[in-house]
Each structure stands twice: as C-alpha cells, then as structure tokens.
Image (cartoon, rainbow, N blue to C red):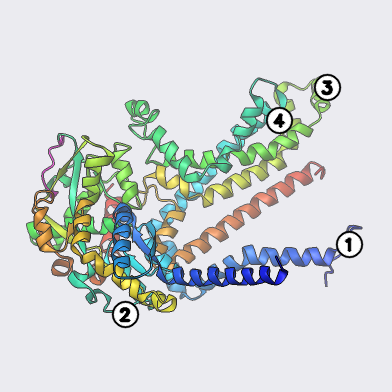
Amino acid sequence: MATVVSRTVIPGFGLTLGFSVFYLSLLFLLPVAGLLIFTLQMSWADFWQAISHPQVVASYKLSFLASFAGATINAVFGSLTAWVLVRYRFPGKKVVDALVDLPFALPTAVAGIALVTLYSTTGWVGQYLQIWNIRIAYSEIGVIIALTYIGLPFVVRTVQPVLADFEKELEEASASLGASRWTTVRRVILPALLPALLTGYALAFARALGEYGSVIFISGNLPYRTEITPLLIVAKAEQYDYQGAAAIGVVMLVAAFLLLLLINGLQWWTNKRNGGAA
Amino acid sequence: MKISTVVKHLTLGTVLAVSSFIATANTTILNVSYDPTREFYREYNQLFSKHWQAQGNAAPTVRQSHGGSGSQARSVIDGLDADVVTLALAYDIDALHNNGNLIPADWQSRLDKNSSPYTSTIVLLVRKGNPKNIKNWDDLVRPDVEVITPNPKTSGGARWNYLAAWGYALKEYGSEEKAYEFIEKLFKNVPVLDSGARGATNTFVQRGIGDVFIAWENEAILSVEQLGKGQFDIVVPSVSILAEPPVTVVDKNVDRKGTRKVAEAYLQHLYSDEAQHLAAKHYYRPSNPAIASQYASAFPKVNLFTIDEVFGGWTKAQQTHFNDGGVFDKVLASINKNR
C-alpha cells in the first residue's frame, strides 16, 4: 500500500492535507458528483440520444475546433507579446503589461457586446470587411475571435516569467558556437519555453471551451452552424431538461479532461526530453 | 448611565428592531417577472402601495426581479422566494406546478381573463419608411428579407412569434403541411437567433441587422417611441395571436412566509381601473374592455386568435412544436440539410 509522507520540516501535514481535500470536495467534487448523479438517472438510450443529436454534435465540433483555433492563435501571439514585454523597453510598457490582464477582469458579456459592435455588418470594422464579403460577427470566425480574446492572458502570463528567468548567456553561447538566429530560437529558446507554453495553451483551451458570455453575443447562435455546446446546455436547462443538460455537460467534462491529460502528458514528455530541468 | 439601563435600552432596541423586521417581512413581497415589464411594475408598485395603505395596512415593500421568462420560472422552481410570478406565457407558470408542485394545476382559473390582467399581441417592426415594403406575414418568407426573432427554444416571446406565424399560415393556406413549409422558409431568413427577446431587440435596433423584427406589441411601441425614435415603423399583420402574459400567487411560498393576503391583493389590484390605465400607458392592452376601448387609437384592431383555439393550449403547443424532437427541431434540421 502506498503511504503518504510529508516531505517538509514544517508540521501540520495532516491538517493541511485534510483541509485541502475537504475544500476541493466541497467546491469542486460536489458539483461534479451532482452532474454525474443527474446523468445516472438516465437510461443508456436516453443518454446516447441526448449527446448524439446532430445539432449537439455540430456544436461539439464548433466548440472544440474554435477553442483549439483560439488557443493556437494565443500560443503564437501570446508568446510574442510575452517576448516583447520581457525583452524590450518602450514607453507605456507598464500599461501594456496591465492591459494583458483585462480580459480576466472585464465581464465576458461586455467583451462580447464590444466585439459585436466592432465586427457586425454595421460595426466600425465590420462595415469595411462587408465590402469584401467577409463576415465576422454571426459566423464561426466571430466565435474564434471571442475565444481568442478571453484566452489571451493565459499564454502571456505563463510564458512571461520563464522568459524573464531565461539566461541570455545561453543565447550568446549558441550564437558564438555558430548557430543561426533561427536555430537558436528553435533549439535553445523554444525547448525551454515549451512546458510553460503548453500550460498556457491548455489553460487558454480549457477557458475557451467553457466560455459562454462573450460568445453568445457574437456567434448569432444559428443551430447546426454557430451554436456552441454551452449554449445548448443552457437551452436544455431552460426547457427543464436537466438530465439532457447534464448529459452534454458530462461529455464536455470527460472530453476536456482527456484533452488536458493529453496536454499534461505532452508537457511531462518535453520536460523529460529536456533532461528534467523543471 | 447605569449598565442595567444600557442593557434595558439595548434589549428594547433589539425587540423593536426584530418586531419591525417581522412586520416588514410580512409585507415584503417579491414579484418575479419577465424582461419588458420592468418599467410597468416599477410604477404599479407605487400605485399598489398607496391602495394597500389606504385600506389601513402597513406600507408594503415590493421587490422585482426580471429576466427571460423561462429562466425566471426555473429560478423559482430552484428556490427563488417569489410571492407572485408575472411571466410571459402560461407554459412557464405551468412548469411551477409540474416541477415541485408550487401551485395547483388549476391556477389559471383563479383570476379573471385567464389570469391575464393585460394582454399583448405580436406585430412586425420594420425600418423607417418600410424600405422592403413589408405588409404582412407573407413578406417574411420572401428570399430578400432578413427576419430577426429570438430562439423559441429559449425565449417565451419567440414562442408567441412562432405560433402567430404558424396560425397565420394555417388560416391562409389551410393545412399543417403548408404551415410547416411557411415556418421553414421564415426561419431560413433568420441570420441571428438570440436567446432572449431583449437580445433580439438589440440586434435589430442597435446593430441594425435584419429588415423586420417580430416583436411583442409593447416592445415594438417602446422601440418606436423611445429606443430609436423616428427610426422604425410598426406593421400590423392581418392576423396575429392574442398573447396573454399571466400572473399567479406562488402558494407554497406565500403560505410559508405568511404573505398570501398581500400577494393576492397585489394581483387583484392589477384589474383595477387605475392599474388598467397604467398598463395601457406601458403599451400593454388592458383586459378590461371598457378601458381598452379608450385606447383604441393606440392599439390597432387586429384579427386575433387564441392559443387555445388554434393549438389546443400551451401544454400541447409546447409538446408538438418546441420540445426536443418537435416540429421546430425538424424545421431546423431540414434548413440545415438544404443549406
């Protein structure tokens, strides 16, 4: 049998562990258990019907693909932003640094309304895109933009501290050994950043998957086309179909958990490959 | 001051505070309503307060809560302490009986006029000057017209919209199949499906999306008079549905809180002359015919059918059209297939 052992000289292991378990159970496990209990009351056929309806399946596709797209965009441009914030000095840097956190603080409904004001066919930006027949609001692109917006801080804030601690000497050593700039980025900087980048990516992805408030304003909520899964869950609950809502919730939960597990596995693997530096 | 006096004062103070708390608790009621009634009930509460005090009672406190009709009903089922509910449609109030048995099944016969002190109907709101020349429901299925309406699955108002259009097509073209085709064509013209009525109003009024907005008459008049003065016209269709937003006391809550008397008086007074005038002022049609006739010019004459006549009541309409696997789901699926 595995035994739990305290690896610190500070006492209070039992107390803190007990409290953590209690706290997590109360805050996290209880709602999840409720979700499972609701679905356990359903027959397998009902459950399958609720989660495999074509309209629901279309929403999974949109939710997962748009979340991936949003997280990927954030991984690229979030890293870039982190790089600029750490490596360069420019006027207004503190302000930009603070602005990065804004998507955390701004109510997501406000973000959604602001985005739709910009991108709808009569909006400031949207009316010009309309000329080239590009529709952003009320299309899949709108969903991706909203999900990118709310996920931005995650990548920046996870990559930033790692970059700040990164030793410049390594880059200089790489350069003096004859590596090209691109090789230095690829072989020296990126591997060191990868674990943090993956964490940020996973967080941004998870956040996007659960996002509701900002998306419903910009997506147009057209069935089979621009309905995200959380919207369908709310719609089911509004119809007093708590079981159907819980069933779709469970699918989201399991899928998200598996994907996060995968990303964590990837992170562990890159760590190991880099000689277990972290 | 001696300590005992201080204690005495404190005790007295506490007793007074507690007793006044109990007194107010008994005359504090919560009215859980839907979105567009906010302004009406704010004024009505003052009216009722005067009336209630004139009868020798302590001043009542009425709190209001507003939101989408369906989600408001769900909140009450989940434990929101509503003394009275004043929602957009009977089906949402039926839910209080079906889930948790908060009210008796025959709640709607407890007050006059199907428990609907004010009514409304569904009209068409178009842009100023009516550039797309929209005259009636038929124009909504033209391929060059974009229609704004919320999702009937989540919005009570949208269910009225859908049923009004269905009832029109049924009358005009004579068969359920034709009505189905009509609805399918109509929803093909919907570019944005908001989840609630206020969201759809914003899409049409603020974002400028769509050529025609299917709306509650009171929301439409509000848009014309206040939200976008001079930007919109109202088109009254030849046929529409009589929308009855009903009210009821939530028995389980008032009996537990001891507020039945004031809650019942609160709803009863909605039928009084002054409240009927107030409803008209907020663009609801008074259910009292004598008072309604005084506002004949404000509310154009429409050939109205009721949900009972055409659909056999809310429960049936809900099951046939809006439940999962119902007609509306089929409409969505076939629109998707033919896209």
State the SS at label 2.
Answer: loop
Q: Position of residue B47 (x, y in %)?
A: 28, 59
Q: Position of residue B44 (x, y in %)?
A: 29, 58
Q: Residue at left 86%, top 64%? A: A5
* Discs 4 and 3 share one subunit: yes
- Write the start and end of the magenta stretch as one range: B130-137
Disc number lying in front (1 or 4) = 1
User: Which residue is labeled 4 in the image?
Assistant: A186
Q: Which mark is residue A11?
A: 1
Name which residue type carries label 4: Arg
Q: Is residue B54 magenta?
A: no
Q: Residue at left 13%, top 69%? A: B309
Name which residue type carries label 1: Pro
Query: Tags 1 and 2 in contact by the CB under 8 Å rule?
Result: no
Sooner in the amino-acid sequence: mark 1 or mark 4: 1
Which one is nearer the viewer's eye here, B7 or A249?
A: B7
What chain does mark 2 sit on? B
Sooner in the amino-acid sequence: mark 4 or mark 3: 3
Disc number lying in front (2 or 3) = 2
- Against A267, residue A179 (above or below) is above
Q: Which mark is residue A177?
A: 3
Disc number lying in front (3 or 1) = 1
Is residue B312 shown to the viewer in this render? no
Q: Quadrant of the C terminus of chain A?
A: top right
* Discs 4 and 2 share one subunit: no
Q: Which mark is residue B104?
A: 2
Disc number lying in front (4 or 2) = 2
Name which residue type carries label 3: Leu
Few, some or many residues within 10 Å of mark 2 (<14, 14–19, 20+):
some
Few, some or many residues within 10 Å of mark 1 (<14, 14–19, 20+):
few
CA gap between label 4 and label 3 equals: 15 Å
